[in-house]
Every structure is written in C-alpha cells, then in structure tokens.
Amino acid sequence: MDTLNLNRRNFLQSQAALVVGASGAVMVGDAAAQAAAPVVVGPPPTALDTWIRISADGSVVANFGKMDCGQGIDLAVAQIVADELDVALDKVHVTMGDTRLSPNQGGGSGSTGLRLGAVPLRNAAAEARRVLVHAAAMKLGVDAAGLSVDNGRVFALADPAKSVTYADLIGGKDFSTPLEWNKEIGNTLRVNGKAKPKDPSQYKIVGKGFKRKDIALKVGAKEHYTAHIRPDNLLHARAVRPPVAGAQPLSVDQASIAHIKGAKSFLKDGFVAVVAETEWNAVRASRSLKVKWSDVPGPFTGGEEKVYEYIRQATPTAANAIPMFGGKKAWDEKPTMAALASAAKVLEADYECAFQSHARIGPSCGVVDVRGDKVEIWADTQKPHFLRMGIAKFLGIPPENVQVKWMHGAGSYGRSDGDEAPYEAALLSKAFGRPVRMQWSREEGTAWDPKAPAAIITMKAGLDASNQVNGWLFKAKGFNGWDVRFTGESPEHVLVGMLTGHKKWNAYNFNVPEESYKFNNHVHWWETVPPYLQEASPMRTAHMRAPQEMQTRFGQESFIDEVAHAAGMHPVDFRLKHLQDPREIEVVKVAAERMGWPKRQKGTAKGDVSTGWGLALHAGYGSYAAVACEVEVNKQTGRIWVKKVSIAHDCGMMVNPIGVRAALEGQIMQGISRALHEEVHFDEKRVKSVDWTTYRIANLNDVPGEVDLVLINRPDKPIGGAGEPAIVCFPAAIANAVFDATGVRIRRYPLVAERVKKALA
C-alpha cells in the first residue's frame, strides 16, 4: 500500500478517498477501489436536476451540498449561478446541506465553500443555460447562436420581440439531462455538462458587493435555529456528565427525580441522560438525578500548570514533515544542526500555545425523530452528510433512511460540539420512541467540546558573520489534531459514541508552515503527543478554525521577527528578502505600507502606555493575508489594546467583496479573542472553563480603534478561501507589536493581562 504524499492544500481537495491504515498513518486504498464509483446516498450527482431547478414562476433553486459557517456563502453561490444562467440575483434561492436534496460536497471544511464547492454548481448552471437556450431555439425556430438571454428571457438577437422565458420552457419540470461526474464524494466532487462556463470577464453579478438578506432575519429573531424545532410529541433531554473525567456511572437513582413530573433517566454504558415533557423539567432532572460514579484518579497530569512540561517530556505518537496531512515523508535535521554548529550566532526559542475551546455562543443542540427504520434529524452541524453516515451507523439503520436538515446555528469553524447533541438525541429517540431535543448547556459547550490542541513550537536559526541565515529549524510538538476526526461520520468520533463502546481511532496530524520563505539548510517537521485520556475526554482535540495554523504561525512569524532584529534588519525587509511568492510579497508590502512602515522604526512610550507595531503573514486555502497591528500596552495592568489593524488580503477572484470584508471583520474579533484571552483552564480532574468568566472571550473593550482592509481582487486567479487565512496571523502580529512597544518577547498565547504584566515586570 502506497502512503500519501500530499500537502495540506492537496489533501483538502481529496479527503474523500481516505481510509485509516493499521499503523495509524493516513493511507489510500488500492487503485481498483479508487477507480470504482463510491456508493451514492441521496440525489445522484449525475442529474442536472439534482443541482438546478427552475420553478413554475421562473425562479431558480440551486441545491448546494455544503453549508454556511456564518459568512453568507449562499449569497456568493447565488451570484455565480445567476451570472451563469443570466437571471436576476433575487431570482436564485440556494438550499444548503439538506441530505434529501443535495449531494455530499464535504460540508464546511478548509475554506472550501466557494473555492471548491461552487465549481459543480457553476458547471451545472452553465449546462442548464445551454439546455434552455437549445429548447428556446426549437420553440422559436431560431438557431441557438442567434439567441441571447436577459433575466431568464431567451430572445432572438435579430428580433427581440421573439422570446420565451425559462418558466415557459421548463418551469416546474425536469431537465432530464445527464452530467459527467468524476466519481468522487466530498470536497472534490465535480460534475460537468457540455457547456463551458463563462469567462469571468463576462460576469455582471460576480465581483459586485451585495448585502445578505439573512442578517435582517437574524436580528429580527425570524430565523429558525435547531433549538426552535418542536415536532409533535417531543421529549426534552439533558445529559449528566461525570464530576471527574473518565469516571463511569455505576448506578442511577430514578427515585431522585420522582418529584419531577414525567422525568425519566437513561443509562447506557457510560452515558447518562434524562428526558422530560418540558425543557425546564429536563434541566431540573439533570441537576437532581443522583448518580453513583466510579472512583478514578484525575487523568490530566499536573493540570494546566504542567501542560507544557507534559508536551516536552511525552514520547511522540507520530511525526511527519508533511503539512498536516498525509503519510510519511522523510526529513533530516542533521544538515541544519551542522550549519547551526558552525554559525556565528544561534537563536533559539520555544513558543507555547494553549488549549482553546470553540465555545460557540449557542451550544450544541440536536432534534431527532427515530420512527422505526426512518430517521429525521435537525442539526447545525458543519457536515450534514457525514452526520447522516455516522448516526445511521450508530443506530444500525441504512443511511438512505436518514435525513439531516441543516439549520443555521452559532458560527464555528472546525470540529466543534455541533455533532454531539444530535447523536445523543438519536440514541434517546430510539430508546423512548419519540422525537427528542437534546440541548447542551453553556458549561457542556465550553468544557466538553473538542479542543484546539495545545502545542510547543521550537525554533532555531543560525546567522553567519555577515548576519545571513545559514540554518533554520522548525519543530511543532503538540496534542493530536486528529485525536477525533474532523467529521462526525462515525460514532467513535463523538462523546456518546465513545461512552457506549466505540473505540477511538488512531490517526495523527499536526502542521508545519507552507509560506515561501527560503532559508539555507531549512528543515521542518511535527510531532504529536498522547492524549491525557484515551476515550471520552473533555480534552479530546480536533480541528479548530485554520487547524493548527495559528499555533505554527505564532512560532514561525514571531521567530522571524526575532531573527530579523538579531540580524539588524527591519522585520518587513527581512520577510521580503526571504519570500519567493509574489502574492505573499505583495500582501506584506501593502499591509506594512498601510500601517505606516517603513517611515516609523521603533515603538513609543508615554507614561505607563507603550505603543508598538507588529506584522505576520499566512498563505493557505488558495489565499494570502498579511496582518499588521498597532497595539497599546499598559505596563501597570498588562492590558493590550489593538489600536489599529491593517490587513492586506488576496483571495483570488472575489465573488462578493462585502462578504469578504465581513469575513475579515469576524476574523479580526476572533483573532484578537484567541490571541489575548481564550484559554482552557483545567486541573487534574476536570475542565474548569465553564462560562464567559472562566473562559474569557473578546468583548466591546477589545474592538480596535481603527480597521483598514485592503482587498486585492484577482479575477484572473481561482477563487480562494476567505474564512481563515487572516485569523492565523493575530497572535504573532500582536506579540511582535508588544515587543516593538516594550522590548519584551512574550512567547505564549493567549497574551492575557496577568501574563503580560508579569513578563514586563
């Protein structure tokens, strides 16, 4: 069996073909298995009607197999479809993530929504236009070459009065037109018709800014979320978690909740829950139920005070030089170490990155109705088609009998708690024979969701007598980015599955930087360490927005700043000297110029407040972002305020500039939040971060004083992802600015006030 040799970008475009080998490395199957078409559950990708429908009134329905993480991606998809079909934007309605209507396009992952997900719909819309124009030619008796389309009306160029509408041609009927399919499921699913999509220069709607319609619905409380779903005969449910992670329930006392009308307890292996006729009674029952738990030692050795000691001392479970994904790639640090040994000056630094929680504003909720061998699910999961697969397996029901209706939910990127409650609701619905609404609490959503892995990034560089880099070493060592998989496609990846006997898989990844810096004797690799608790852990780790990229770039981009200063160069000039990719060079130059470099060289101080500038770069997801920050540091309180943010952003062809700008604004606030505040607190027994006090996030006091966004549009380039690249830069950009302001390096994020105050003292 050949091992994969993929970088992160390639993997995100081909994840559907992966299986897990016995060694724990991620591997592909044999050629015959890959050549065979995967089993299709739900609408066939080969039918044009699966993708595009023309309603009786001439409006267009586009079925999208992905979902929206709060970026308004449905609007951008509608823009593409409208341009290809030559209809008005307000005539296009995009359905998202409904397994009954759309094929599996991989859900939300790796900023692939438009970058990859829009490709099949663009091709399908182009083919639909071709079929409709051909039908109009037959009806009007005019050669297709002599026809044009305006807002769904096909007319003769020689006689515009001779026309027919899409609605007249096919409204409410089937295209009955086949498409070619590449026999792949997930992010890489592609379909093609006979038509060639338009050249971007022909677009009239793509590239223009349009405001989202769903914002008004959300602000006006008219948008429905999973938590609002109320099927008839509904039971409300709550889980009961152990006081010590890893403890098992020995017994439950049903009599302890007898005073709560209709409340019932549920126990299966390690999973304890209650159900009731009303939500409040379910909450009361979960608090009142007496459970006898096994006596176990706290699994989190040393608690958070010893987490970095644990990482340093742990024997690695896996190591790899490939960015994040793939099989084995050999690397050799000996040439680098030899170069460092001969260097005139050697710099070394460790950068520490805390565990972080997704901490969704709305914790996990799932509504499930199991009726015999038919299952209906409402969930705001990021990957509805994979959730269908997983719950079908969990319940022993054919996946074609399971429907997931994706709902809008709290914004999140990566493997949050979104899949957890639907699994629990499914188990309870099957047991009680009624629809069940499982709602997680704030405490559960923060304490028990999968976490972004803590890590240490080790950096070394050598400078020769003329201050040229003669060796560069990068090593990431941290908790596994694949402790549980980034989809809920199987029960072993969710809490209730592990609690009911599904053993967690063994596969590993972390990450290394991929920017185009060229250094002599450059080596990089990553290592993962064992989890504290193998099964059903509140500290299980998985993907969080830009998985492991924030950790790796915190180390890389902070150290670049350090080496630049040691070499006597401005950090911007040092980057420009070593970067090879012209798009990376451009965003660095633009962000630096907008901040005011190179006119200003050093930070300033006034009383207790010092001001400084810092910059960081990230390239990934087909996009490029440089973030420059001006910060104020209060030496007495340790508080950091990001006074100004300048971002240069290049995501190729922009479909909706308003959407890109909004995505960046969201990244600014979450980036500041993760850089300055977010940190999971835990002792040896349990996670102690359970609310907005113990898990601090950014608030109104953290809003920057000025935001300057430069959107670089490249209509000649493919669409890149806009939801993740900039957020990666914030910890390093802010830490570099703190050094510029104070002369002190802080090598651990988040840069909480007490940590900063102590470092400055």
Image (cartoon, helix red, strand yellow):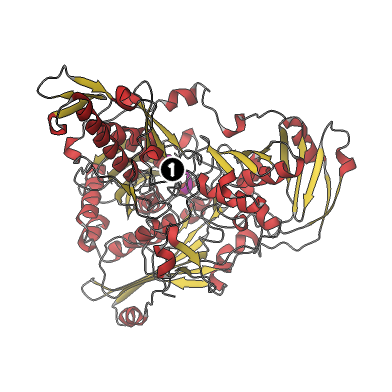
Most common SS among magenta residues: helix
Element carrying mark 1: loop
Quadrant position of residue 328? bottom left
> Can you see residue 206?
no
Residue in front for this viewpoint, 303 or 324: 324
- Image position, residue 172 (x, y; %): 39, 26
| Residue for badge 1 | 66
- Image position, residue 590 (x, y; %): 22, 46
**Quadrant in which the N terminus appears:** bottom left
For label 1, the crowd category at 10 Å Cα-Cα, with few meaning under 14, some 14 to 19 and many 20 or more, is many
The outermost residue toward the top is 161
- Image position, residue 689 (x, y; %): 63, 47
The outermost residue toward the right is 255
In magenta, the rendered stretch is 669-674
Residue appearing at x 11%, y 20% in the figure: 159
Left or right: residue 233 compared with residue 195: right
Residue in front for this viewpoint, 676 or 134: 134
Residue 529: in magenta span:
no
> Can you see residue 660?
yes
- Image position, residue 663 (x, y; %): 37, 39
